[in-house]
Image (cartoon, helix red, strand yellow):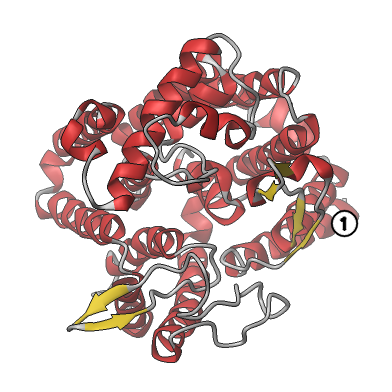
């Protein structure tokens, strides 16, 4: 009994360490033959072992040794909960899609990470009661937010990476002279956005937009959150990610709306969910507007063209998709309207990405999971910030792919569900 208790304590300690280092991008990359498309290395196809992956493996390992699986099947009876059933079917459907993939190794490797993070989702439901650990978790995220925000601000001042070395927390080396780094105008001067420890400013901005709302929700009660909140807002500004700015303001608005009149909170939650669902549907219609596909703004036109290309991919691979994490292999073949010589990026919409890679069954199970999550969040009488985070993820996922393709934000997605669906 003592040994089991000790093992549970170790797994929880590692869990909190994982939350703290969530933004870290440090990992070992394995460039293989299947990572190249037309002679060009596609980083989404490179199998990588990240520090977070190792921590999750250790958490699950110590948890299983402590008898965690027995608590899942016997004590908590989680299998009767619909969000667990749908999430299990969703993960299994993507496994089936790997069997249909043209590049099996990148596909099955991406699925193994997804499955690993799904196990962490189950672990969170069973072992991390949110009533007990809520503020400890929030304190950890606020400190992590402060440190990564300071780095982001320093990168903006430096006009590039600070440590300039992948080995230091996985910071991506870059400067204004680096090919592909976007340039922005700031008071008439050309500047380089902040990357933090992420692979793109939009991902950094998306992460900040979610965590900042958590901190904002308790600024009045915990004044020491003001410092990470201030630094985080400045860092968010320096990402120049407009969608992240909008989603952050949307999250703040929802928080103020929910706390204004607690008696009306359930109806307001329903209206917020409907509004986000409406925005998600509109995002799927992006390529139908010629003014978006023909605009001189490359960011918008690329997204619209990728959406149009994904529809063609879905038409030819409706049932089972092209294989999980395989869309970048074929996207250029379907992107007829694209003006870029090569732009091997996943479609910037997680719903179309799952449809094109996993087929119609993966999309259905994911949609059922989303609906069940929304229903649980609406009926929950506990902290509303996880509903807000959930809606923010849906909005961000309607205009980008990183909640499926990037390990930090994929991990954040499952953590939000694991903590919020209790």
Q: Quadrant of residue 194?
A: bottom left
> Can residue 380 be seen here?
no
**Which x, y percent locates residue 125?**
58, 41
Q: Nearer the viewer, residue 235 or 286?
A: 286
Residue at the (21%, 39%) spot, across then down: 292
Q: Nearer the viewer, residue 414 or 39?
A: 39
Q: Quadrant of residue 113?
A: top right
- Could you say whether the residue bearing mark 1 is in a helix, strand or loop? helix
Taking the image as shown, residue 193 lies to the left or right of residue 334, namely left
Q: Is residue 398 above or below residue 10?
A: above
* Residue sitting at x 22%, y 34%: 279
Where in the figure is residue 14, as x and y percent of width and height? 72, 63
Q: Quadrant of residue 272?
A: top left
Position of 319 with respect to 368 (left or right) is right
Asked if residue 64 shows in the view, the reply is yes
Q: Residue 394: x, y in percent? A: 36, 39
Q: Nearer the viewer, residue 155 or 127?
A: 155
Q: Which residue is mark 1?
A: 2
């Amino acid at each position: 009994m003592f040994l089991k208790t000790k093992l549970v304590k170790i797994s929880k300690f590692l869990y909190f360490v994982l939350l703290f280092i969530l933004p870290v991008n440090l990992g070992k990359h394995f460039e293989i033959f299947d990572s190249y498309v037309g002679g060009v290395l596609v980083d989404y196809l490179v199998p990588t072992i990240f520090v977070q992956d190792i921590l999750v493996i250790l958490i699950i390992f110590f948890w299983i040794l402590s008898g965690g699986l027995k608590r899942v099947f016997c004590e908590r009876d989680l299998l009767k909960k619909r969000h667990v059933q749908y999430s299990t079917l969703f993960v299994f459907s993507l496994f089936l899609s790997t069997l249909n993939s043209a590049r099996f190794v990148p596909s099955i490797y991406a699925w193994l990470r997804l499955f690993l993070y799904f196990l962490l989702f189950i672990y969170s439901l069973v072992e991390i009661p949110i009533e007990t650990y809520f503020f400890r978790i929030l304190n950890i995220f606020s400190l992590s937010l402060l440190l990564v925000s300071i780095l982001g601000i320093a990168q903006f001042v430096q006009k590039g990476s600070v440590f300039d070395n992948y080995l230091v927390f996985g910071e991506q080396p870059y400067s204004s002279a680096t090919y592909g780094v976007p340039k922005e105008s700031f008071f008439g001067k050309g500047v380089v956005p902040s990357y933090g420890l992420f692979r793109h400013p939009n991902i950094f901005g998306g992460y900040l937009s979610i965590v900042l709302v958590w901190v904002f929700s308790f600024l009045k009660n915990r004044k020491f959150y003001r410092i990470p909140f201030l630094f985080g807002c400045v860092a968010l500004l320096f990402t120049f990610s407009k969608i992240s700015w909008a989603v952050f303001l949307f999250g703040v608005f929802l928080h103020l709306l929910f706390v204004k009149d607690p008696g009306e909170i359930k109806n307001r939650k329903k209206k917020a969910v409907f509004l986000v669902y409406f925005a998600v549907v509109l995002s799927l219609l992006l390529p139908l507007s010629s003014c978006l596909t023909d605009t001189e703004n490359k960011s918008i036109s690329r997204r619209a063209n990728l959406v149009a290309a994904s529809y063609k991919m879905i038409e030819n691979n409706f049932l089972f998709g092209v294989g999980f994490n395989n869309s970048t292999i074929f996207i250029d073949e379907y992107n007829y309207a694209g003006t870029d010589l090569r732009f091997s990026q996943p479609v910037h919409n997680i719903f179309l990405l799952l449809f094109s890679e996993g087929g119609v069954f993966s999309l259905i199970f994911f949609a059922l999971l989303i609906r069940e999550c929304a229903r649980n969040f609406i009926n929950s009488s506990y902290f509303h910030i996880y509903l807000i985070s959930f809606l923010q993820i849906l909005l961000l996922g309607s205009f980008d792919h990183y909640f499926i393709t990037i390990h930090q934000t994929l991990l954040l997605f499952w953590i939000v569900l694991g903590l919020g669906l209790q």
